[in-house]
Image (spheres, rainbow, N blue to C red):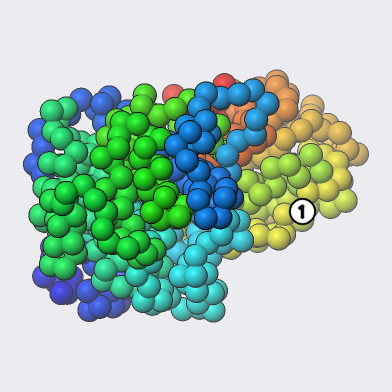
């Protein structure tokens, strides 16, 4: 199979390059799938099912971690599971997510940023954020190691049949639900980043197709009928036969479980016979798989896509990063944003982006989320058409101007990784002034200037500059067409921004926690992409209304 034989592959080839697509196609790692031709469903119904799928996947993942910590031999019985899933109790901490959910989020973000170039983007994100992954599998660790050694993303994966890519397939199925012809291709490309085997990529394509079909199905379409229709279109005979045999069986799961992708999918599908009671679904899947995380995550996603969040226990609100996940679900329901074709120029001018990052001691509680959000933001921005140069400066009272990215093309911005180590106090005014000194010296004459400031605290350590002096300086730069964005926590960001001549339309509060940072970066990614895609006169016209009609970081309030 070559991509020349499949016209649907052309936009992926344009985004990823002919070498990547040829390499993957020659190994038969790219799969397609044909979905049922459903009549249009109320978008609100589809959005509800997507919300359910996201919540179900993360709850299944969280439950797996709890199940694996229970009795070694017997696991948890139905009563214990029902108690664990029961009503929320105040004072209890959130349920931590493992690599299954973390990589689900990575793939979802990559797909939303650029559905055609998402696999390359995912590889870059994995490289930059791998240290934050909790219990990644051997295939992912092997892939990351090879990526760091310079292996191209399309050749870095081992020939693994494992199931670690399946939660990412759920993300693909949700992200491109409105574009069913692309689902199988996108999911197999995503899986190929870490699992270079036909069975792994074909299983991922199959699952993505099933998820898409479930969230788009007519109200009167049964689960088995929908899944069977998708299975019939699988283009790998052995895989299609195994799934069809399971669906036509007598209700018993007779095949010994292994963490192979196909076994994981079969078990997750089989467990749905115990729905709409999630207790029964998770008990069945956990008992046979001994708490396999990817399997339980997929089982939860299938349950949520079928019944929506209303069928989930209230406990799912205790999952780590719940608010951020709800924001992600809404974005998935909206679908991938339109992007310019590869090679097209966005706008009529280049861009210089100046990023000022508060590294004072108060940022220590969210340091992990600052880094992961930063890396994800630039991984997304790398896929946007148009030239941009990036400078990133972090600051505290020990170093008011620590340059960690110095005028690099946006496609080459590295992870901040271990460079971000919070300490000291917050000389905000001095740091802004020093950044503007650099920007005025080195900013391109033909480039539009965008200054982004992120801080979680009040000014408390400046020795030279005041907000009054900054007010006049920033005002003059705005008159020259510069755009300023101010993101603040633990303060009235609008009052602080106003004191420095920053328009309210360019200011946003954010919560200093994981969900707040995720929403903050999601909004910043959207708005910077929009800004980069505008013509110069449009950038100037909208300079005081950077966020448009929404501020994702404030939607959590």
> Residue 50: which quarter of the image?
top left
Q: Decide which of 189, 398 is in the foreground and name it.
A: 189
Q: Is residue 60 above or below residue 15?
A: above
Q: Position of residue 327 (x, y in %)?
A: 46, 33
Residue at figure coordinates x 18%, y 62% from the top left:
242
Residue sitting at the far right: 463
At 70% from the left edge and 47% from the top edge, which residue is drawn?
A: 367
Q: Residues within 10 Å of mark 1 (few under 14, many from 20)?
A: some
Q: Position of residue 503 (x, y in %)?
A: 60, 25
Q: Residue at 17% across / 74% down in the picture? A: 2
Q: Quadrant of the N terminus?
A: bottom left
Relative to 363, is 470 above or below? above
- Tell which of 545 and 94 is nearer to you: 94
Asked whether 548 or 69 is in front, the reply is 69
Can I make out residue 409 in this image?
no
User: Which residue corresponds to mark 1?
Assistant: 421
Q: Position of residue 132 (x, y in %)?
A: 60, 56
Residue closest to the eye, 7 or 404: 7
The local secondary structure at tag 1 comes to loop
In the rendered image, the vertical position of residue 333 relative to residue 207, given as above or below? above
Does residue 74 appear left or right of residue 232 in this picture?
Answer: right
Rendered image quadrant of residue 493 = top right
Determine whether, in the image, residue 231 is placed left or right of residue 307: left
Could you say where residue 139 lies in the image, as x and y percent from the top left? 45, 70
- Residue at 19% x, 38% y is 223
Report if residue 554 is visible in the image.
yes
Q: Quadrant of the image for the C terminus? A: top right
Q: Give the number of callouts.
A: 1
């Amino acid at each position: 199979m070559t991509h020349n034989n499949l016209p649907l592959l052309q936009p992926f080839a344009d985004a990823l390059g002919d070498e990547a697509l040829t390499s993957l196609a020659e190994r038969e790692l790219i799969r397609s799938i044909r979905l049922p031709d459903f009549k249009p469903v109320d978008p609100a119904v589809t959005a509800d099912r997507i919300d359910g799928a996201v919540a179900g996947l993360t709850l299944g993942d969280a439950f797996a971690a709890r199940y694996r910590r229970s009795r070694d031999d017997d696991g948890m019985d139905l009563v214990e599971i029902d108690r664990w899933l029961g009503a929320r109790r105040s004072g209890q901490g959130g349920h931590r997510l493992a690599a299954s959910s973390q990589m689900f989020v990575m793939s979802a973000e990559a797909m939303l940023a650029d559905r055609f170039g998402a696999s390359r983007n995912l590889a870059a994100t994995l490289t930059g954020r791998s240290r934050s992954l909790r219990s990644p599998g051997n295939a992912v660790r092997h892939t990351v190691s090879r990526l760091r050694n310079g292996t191209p993303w399309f050749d870095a994966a081992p020939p693994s049949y494992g199931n670690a890519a399946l939660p990412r397939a759920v993300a693909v199925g949700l992200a491109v639900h409105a574009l069913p012809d692309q689902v199988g291709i996108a999911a197999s490309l995503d899986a190929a980043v870490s699992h270079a085997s036909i069975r792994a990529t074909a299983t991922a394509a199959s699952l993505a197709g099933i998820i898409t079909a479930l969230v788009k199905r007519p109200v009167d379409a049964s689960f088995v009928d929908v899944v069977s229709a998708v299975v019939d279109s699988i283009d790998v005979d052995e895989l299609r036969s195994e799934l069809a045999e399971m669906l036509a069986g007598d209700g018993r799961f007779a095949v010994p479980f292994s963490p192979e992708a196909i076994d994981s999918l079969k078990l997750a599908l089989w467990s749905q016979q115990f729905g709409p009671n999630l207790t029964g679904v998770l008990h069945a899947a956990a008992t046979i798989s001994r708490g396999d995380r990817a399997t339980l995550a997929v089982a939860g996603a299938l349950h949520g896509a079928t019944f929506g969040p209303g069928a989930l226990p209230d406990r799912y609100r205790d999952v780590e990063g719940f608010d951020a996940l709800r924001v992600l679900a809404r974005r998935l329901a909206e679908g991938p944003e339109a992007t310019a074709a590869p090679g097209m120029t966005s706008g009529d001018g280049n861009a210089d982006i100046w990023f000022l990052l508060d590294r004072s001691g108060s940022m220590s509680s969210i340091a992990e989320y600052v880094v992961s959000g930063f890396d994800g933001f630039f991984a997304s921005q790398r896929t946007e058409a148009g030239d941009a140069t990036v400078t990133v400066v972090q600051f505290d009272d020990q170093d008011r101007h620590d340059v960690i990215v110095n005028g690099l093309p946006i496609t080459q911005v590295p992870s901040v990784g271990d460079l971000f180590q919070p300490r000291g106090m917050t000389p905000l005014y001095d740091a802004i002034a020093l950044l503007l000194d650099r920007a005025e010296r080195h900013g391109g004459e033909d480039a539009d200037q965008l200054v982004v400031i992120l801080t979680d605290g009040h000014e408390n350590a400046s020795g030279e500059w005041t907000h009054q002096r900054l007010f006049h300086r920033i005002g003059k730069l705005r008159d020259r067409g510069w755009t300023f964005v101010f993101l603040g926590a633990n303060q009235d960001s609008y009052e602080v921004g106003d004191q420095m001549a920053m328009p309210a339309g360019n200011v946003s509060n954010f919560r200093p926690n994981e969900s707040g940072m995720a929403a903050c970066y999601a909004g910043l990614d959207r708005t910077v992409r929009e800004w980069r895609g505008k013509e110069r006169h449009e950038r100037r016209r909208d300079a005081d209304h950077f966020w448009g009609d929404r501020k994702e970081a404030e939607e959590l309030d």
